[in-house]
Image: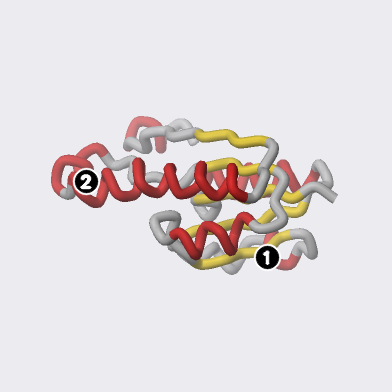
Amino acid sequence: MAKVLLTGGTGFIGMICSRTFLDAGWSVHVLDRRSPDLNSKLHSHNKFSFQKGDICIVEDVERAILGCDAVVHLAAQVSIPKSFEHPNENYRTNVIGTQNILDASHKYGVSSFQHQVLPYTERLKNYL
């Protein structure tokens, strides 16, 4: 059975990705700093699991990626104002965190990696 790791999977796009993978028969493991919406039906799905953690912490990433065949990397700091207010945090999450995911993917033999960052703006919110 195929297993995918979704980083940043508690957001809107992550939850849609989770449902899509589950519907296709995959097991889904989500790594995120935020707790998922407990009202979501995903949590009761027997092929869904969640790990609270940070992509900037190598141990969290390695624990999450064990046994995964694919990674969809959605975790990011996407707020443009925050990137100017806290540039070091922006760099840490978007660069160091992504490097941790790539390193662990290579180390544990993940065969497929997809990275997607969508800037979340009020204009985009109106379309979602």
Q: Amino acid at mark 2?
A: Lys
The mark closer to the camera, 2 or 1, is: 2
Residue farthest left in this picture? 85
Closer to the chain start, of discs 2 and 1, is 1
Which disc is residue 117 wearing?
Answer: none
Q: Is residue 119 above or below residue 12?
A: above
| Amino acid type, callout 1 | His
Answer with the quarter of the image where residue 47 lies. bottom right
Horizontal side of residue 16 vs 125, given as left or right: right
x and y, in percent, of residue 64 in the image: 59, 60
- Of the pair 121 and 25, the residue shown nearer to us: 25
The residue identified by callout 1 is 43
Foreground: 52 or 109? 109
Q: Nearer the viewer, residue 10 or 88?
A: 88
Q: What secondary structure is found at the residue carrying circle 1?
A: helix
- Residue for point 35% across, 42% down: 94
The residue lying toward the viewer, choosing from 118 and 31, is: 31
Q: Residues within 10 Å of mark 2 (few under 14, many from 20)?
A: few
Task: Say the numbered circle drawn on residue 82.
Answer: 2
Inter-mark Cα distance, 2 to 1 = 31 Å
Q: Position of residue 70 (x, y in %)?
A: 67, 42
Q: Secondary structure at mark 2?
A: helix
| Residue 103 image point, x, y percent | 51, 45
Local packing at callout 1 (Cα closer than 10 Å; few below 14, some 14-19, many 20+) is some
Residue beneath the point at 52% across and 57% down:
61
Q: Where residue 18 sits in the image (x, y, percent)?
A: 66, 48
Position above or below: 121 against 28: above
84 horizontally vs 101: left or right = left
Task: Say if 113 sits above or below 34 in the image.
Answer: above
Q: How is the image coloured?
A: secondary structure
The residue drawn where x is 58% and y is 64% is: 63
Residues at badges 2 and 1 in contact (C-beta under 8 Å)?
no
